[in-house]
Image: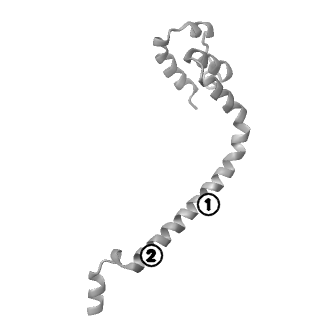
Amino acid sequence: LKFKAVVSTQSTGEEKWFKEASSILSLYQEEQRKKEDAEKQKERAKYLECLKPKLEALKENSSKSAQQFLCWLYTEYPPKHYASFAINIKKLKKTPAEQLKKTVSKAIILLSP
C-alpha cells in the first residue's frame, strides 16, 4: 500500500520514460497524418486533373473587372436550379462599380449549390 501511495502522488508527466513515450507517440501520429494526407492528395489529383481546364478559365477570368467576371460567370455557368432565371448581360456590363455589391451578393446566392 505504501508503494501505491508513493506512485500515485508522483506526477508521471515529469518522468523521463513518460516524456519519451509521449514524443514517440506524437512522432507516430504525425507520420500517420502525413500518410493519410498523401493518400487524400492522390485521390484528389484525379479530380483536379479533370477540372484543370475549368479552374484555369476561372483563374484567368477572375483577374478581370467585376462586371466582366460576372458576365463570363453567368454565360458559362447559368444557375441550374432557377428555371426562370434571366439576366441582361448588356445591362450588367454597364453597371457602375458602386452598385455591383448587390449584384455580386445576388450571384453568390444564385450560383451556390
* 2 or 1: mark nearer the eye: 2
Name the secondary structure under disc 2: helix
Q: Which mark is residue 20?
A: 2
Residue at (54%, 21%) from the top-left corner? 107
Of the two numbered discs 2 and 1 on the same chain, state the one appearing first in sequence: 2
Q: Position of residue 109 (x, y in %)?
A: 52, 25
Q: Is residue 76 visible?
A: yes
Vertical placement of residue 10 versus 29, above or below: below
Residue at (50%, 9%) from the top-left corner? 96
Based on the displayed image, in which of its 4 quarters is residue 28 positioned? bottom right
Residue at (64%, 28%) from the top-left corner? 58
Vertical placement of residue 20 versus 48, above or below: below
Q: Is residue 1 visible?
A: no
Name the secondary structure under disc 1: helix
* Amino acid on which the number 2 mark rests in the picture: Glu
Count of marks overlaid on the render: 2
Q: Position of residue 18 (x, y in %)?
A: 40, 77
CB within 8 Å, label 2 to label 1: no
Q: Quadrant of the C terminus?
A: top right
Q: Position of residue 47 (x, y in %)?
A: 70, 43
* Amino acid on which the number 1 mark rests in the picture: Lys
Vertical placement of residue 92 versus 61, above or below: above
Q: Which mark is residue 113?
A: none
Q: Nearer the viewer, residue 73 or 55?
A: 55
How crowded pointer 2 is (Cα within 10 Å; few <14, some 14-19, many 20+) is rated as: few
How far is mark 2 from mark 1, CA to CA? 23 Å
Q: Position of residue 105 (x, y in %)?
A: 49, 22
What residue is pinned by disc 1?
35
Based on the displayed image, in which of its 4 quarters is residue 63 positioned? top right
